[in-house]
Image (tube, grey):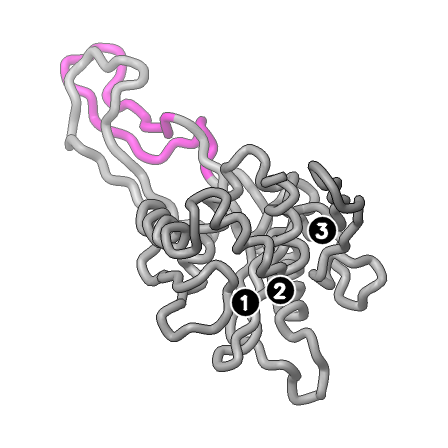
Amino acid sequence: TLRDLLGVSFLQSASDTVTTLAFAIDGGVEPFVQGMNDLAVEIGCEYTHYANVTGLDSLSQYTTPRDMYRIIRYAMGLSQFEDIVSARQITVTPVSGGTERTMVSVNHQQQSSSTFYYSPLVFGRTGLSSHEGRTYAAVARDSGYEYLAVVMGAPEQNEAGESGIHYRDARALFRWGFNYFEYTNVLAASEILASVPVRLSWSTDRVNLVPAHGFSTVVESSLDPDQIIKRVTVFEESVDAPVEAGQVLGMTKSQ
């Protein structure tokens, strides 16, 4: 089935399956590759071009970490993508003829018996180029946080003679993200940011400005809230009464 072909191509780096997919979907490799290039442009890739479906070296086939991020984020929005690519193994049952067989992922970070195994990994895809080295794009999820790492140009070995540099670098990036960043509230909805004089009012001469809503984001875990600089822009030097709740009188930017 097409689903089995997708699963095997991702888990096994099987060139025969992606070629079969190209013929099944577009009647050949060339129109399928053209569709890949068209989609890359559609989703905002700025420096990506495909020359084949196998990933084998070609001087006219290239991408960047930023474009790879865009491609993976697009794929993650497809309904069955994660179910297929996160599998550690796949059992293929032929539609007719042949015999059932089970194939294991060639990604060592998905193999519990490997020294590169990384349990928070959701999925990852390796690449190899004779002139650019090893590449790796992966997603890991832990304790409610999710990170996407893209490693390119990794050598076969480091100065210590260790292999699997692309796996080591990805794991280091993930650990850095999980250990040094956290999602936190940096702006409370009740925080007074400024005040504006009010004219034509007997009861008050100023009105306080607060955010329309609170704001939370991912920041460095050790960040002191007092280090966050809030730059407030007030639109008017003063305002006439009556002042309605929710009336927009300024804006703020945190950094």
- Magenta-colored span: 187-212
In the rendered image, which residue does mark 3 sit on? 120
Please report the residue visible at 71 percent of the width from the left and 46 percent of the height from the top. 87
Task: Tell which of 50 and 243 is nearer to you.
Answer: 50
21 w.r.t. 162: above or below: above
Local crowd size for mark 1, using a 10 Å CA cut-off: few (<14), some (14–19), many (≥20): many
* Residue 66, image quadrant: bottom left
Q: Is residue 81 above or below residue 38?
A: above
Q: Is residue 232 visible?
A: yes
Q: Are marks 1 and 2 in contact (CB under 8 Å)?
A: yes
Q: Amino acid at mark 1?
A: Val
Identify the residue shown where x is 45% and y is 51%: 71
Quarter-of-image position of residue 143: top right
Residue at 48%, 50% in the rendered image: 22
Assign a secondary structure to mark 1. Answer: strand
**Which residue corresponds to mark 1?**
151
Q: Earlier in the sequence, mark 1 or mark 2?
A: 1
* Label 2 sits on residue: 170
Closer-to-camera residue (177/122): 122
**Could you tell me how far apart the alpha carbons at marks 2 and 3 are, in whole angstroms?**
12 Å
